[in-house]
Image (spheres, rainbow, N blue to C red):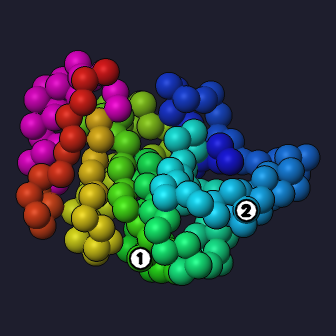
Amino acid sequence: DPTCNLSCPACRSELYKCGSEKRELTRKIHEHMFEAGLRDAEYITISTNGDPFASPFYLSALREFDWRAHPKLRINFITNGVRLTPEMWASVNNCHRSVNSIHVSVNAATESTFDIVQRGGNWPRLLATGMAEADFAVTDFRLEPTAPRFVLELSGGLAQLEGLLQCRYGPRIMTVGV
């Protein structure tokens, strides 16, 4: 489900929500994937083309799927982090023991750039997510710059972001070149 709460220019020109014409098909796909498709799976990545915490389909699965019936299955989240609040995390507590990682995609290192490249985002909330990482009790929690490094390095942006996000266990920013 490519539903997302942002409309980043790198991904899409407008917000996307699953419309009524695709809702039933998407529900059936999710139902099949979470019931039969994960039987022998060890890892599942949710999501790379939307946000798991913006999708009613993913949220339903995270809250209602019987994760205990799949003890070897581990979840890897890829999110923009805006909706990943401690309250949202508590609402999906059914899946917590199955979570392997949470990777938050960050397309900017300063608020002014963030407002341009993550349309609809909320810079203070993203920073709060990064600083609340200990609340998520996940060993592999990272902020992953996804924009070209020159964007992140404008005015020392990457260093500024690392300084703002001194997490409980030290900085958790994975610097990758694009």
Is residue 157 within the magenta segment?
Answer: yes
Is residue 13 within the magenta segment?
Answer: no
Q: Earlier in the sequence, mark 1 or mark 2?
A: 2
Instruction: Name the element at disc 1.
Output: helix
Q: Which residue is mark 1?
A: 97
160 versus 66 height, above or below = above
Left or right of 143: which side holds 160? left
Residue 28, x across and y down, in percent: 83, 57
Residue drawn 67% across the image and 70% down it: 60
77 versus 90 height, above or below = above
Q: Nearer the viewer, residue 160 or 103?
A: 103
Q: Which residue is mark 2?
A: 36
Question: Which residue type does callout 1 highlight?
Answer: Arg
Q: Nearer the viewer, residue 170 or 155?
A: 170
Residue 134, x across and y down, in percent: 23, 71
Examine the residues drawn in magenta and state their main secondary structure: helix
Say if residue 143 shows up in the picture.
yes
Residue drawn 12% across the image and 52% down it: 171
Q: CA distance from mark 1 to mark 2?
A: 20 Å
Residue drawn 25% across the image and 23% down it: 177
Residue 54, x across and y down, in percent: 59, 57
Q: Quadrant of residue 7?
A: top right
**Magenta residues (range):** 146-165
Residue drawn 11% across the image and 29% down it: 156
Q: Quadrant of residue 176?
A: top left
Q: Residues within 10 Å of mark 1 (few under 14, many from 20)?
A: some
